[in-house]
Image (cartoon, rainbow, N blue to C red):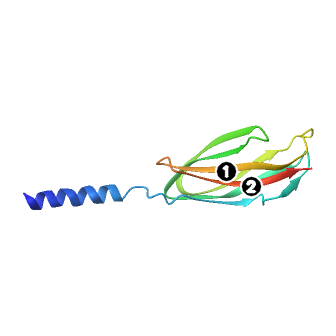
Amino acid sequence: MIKSLIAILTISFLMTSCGDDGGLTLTVDSPNNDTVYNPGDIVDITGTATDDVAVVSLIFASSELNFSETVPVPSQQSVPFNFTINIVENSQLQDDIKIEVTAIDDEGNSITEERSISIQ
């Protein structure tokens, strides 16, 4: 009886420890902080999201530029990304525009990186 209980506890422990351990990472290669853009320019947001199990979506957002887009990605451990933002010709000139990139894994864990740009 005790051997059976120990075996059950061991199997339960192994099953719970094999899941996603929060190994989610996010690297944003561009844009660099404090990059200056002009109205009409294109902002390329590039980088890689990585997880020990699977990345399932990316969110690109900026409240100052009025956009938020969730992009589902093929469920895989490493997801390179290239997302573009078109700065419209009549954009208001402003500093300290925050752009956020968020990666989400298959367990709902998330990580966010932020960049700050200007339109002049």
Quadrant of res 17 = bottom left
Q: Is residue 56 left or right of residue 32?
A: left
Q: Residue 60 in the image: state x and y as whole percent.
A: 68, 46
Rendered position, 78 above or below 63: below
Question: Mark 2 is on which residue type?
Answer: Arg
Q: Residue at x 28, y 58 (%)?
A: 13
Q: Residues within 10 Å of mark 1 (few under 14, many from 20)?
A: many
Pick the residue in front: 47 or 61: 61
Image quadrant holding the N terminus, namely bottom left
How many labels, in total?
Answer: 2
Q: Looking at the rendered structure, which numbered label has been put on residue 115?
A: 2
Q: Are marks 2 and 1 in contact (CB under 8 Å)?
A: yes
Q: Nearer the viewer, mark 2 or mark 1?
A: 2
Pick the residue in front: 17 or 63: 63
Q: Residue at x 78, y 59 (%)?
A: 33
Quadrant of res 12 = bottom left
